[in-house]
Amino acid sequence: MPLAGSDAPDAAFAFFRYGYAQMDRVWNRFGCLPAADVGVADPACPEIFATFEDSMKFARSRGPALNGR
């Protein structure tokens, strides 16, 4: 989110909207995990994508715990 004192909050929100609109391209074009639950209609490597998608059923998020521990 743009900071409250941002010089261009409208441009920042436009950038966020653009990025979100591109989520369906993220896997094929950049090989990255989408930030949102999106469908990939025609993956460039179907076998690899199927394995990846199946592995996500058992994935756990890793990062700092909400309670700070």
Image (spheres, rainbow, N blue to C red):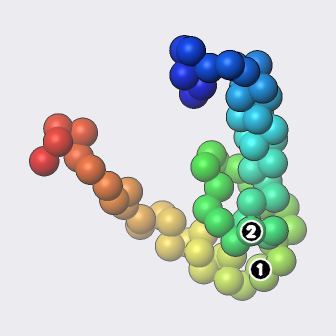
Q: Residue at x 74, y 40 (%)?
A: 20
Location of the N terminus (image quadrant) = top right
Is 69 placed above or below 4 here? below
Location of residue 30 in the rendering, given as x and y in whole percent from the top left corner:
74, 68
Location of residue 41 in the rendering, given as x and y in whole percent from the top left corner:
84, 61
Q: Nearer the viewer, mark 2 or mark 1?
A: 2
- The label number, if any, that marks residue 46 in the structure image: 1
Element assignment for label 1: helix
Q: Is residue 4 left or right of residue 15?
A: left
Report which residue position mark 2 lands on.
30
Q: Is residue 44 left or right of residue 65?
A: right
Is 54 placed above or below 19 here? below
Question: Is the residue under label 1 in contact with that under label 2 (CB below 8 Å)?
Answer: no
How packed is label 1: few (under 14 Cα within 10 Å), some, or many (20 or more)? Answer: few
Figure label count? 2
Extreme-right residue of the structure: 42
Amino acid at pointer 2: Phe
Q: Residue at x 17, y 38 (%)?
A: 67
How packed is label 2: few (under 14 Cα within 10 Å), some, or many (20 or more)? Answer: few
Q: Residue at x 79, y 69 (%)?
A: 28
Asked which quadrant contains residue 25, the reply is: bottom right
Element assignment for label 2: helix
Amino acid at pointer 1: Pro
Asked which quadrant contains residue 19, the reply is: top right
Extreme-front residue of the structure: 7
Location of residue 61 in the rendering, given as x and y in whole percent from the top left corner:
38, 57
Location of residue 14 in the rendering, given as x and y in whole percent from the top left corner:
79, 28
Asked which quadrant contains residue 29, the reply is: bottom right
Q: CA distance from mark 2 to mark 1?
A: 15 Å
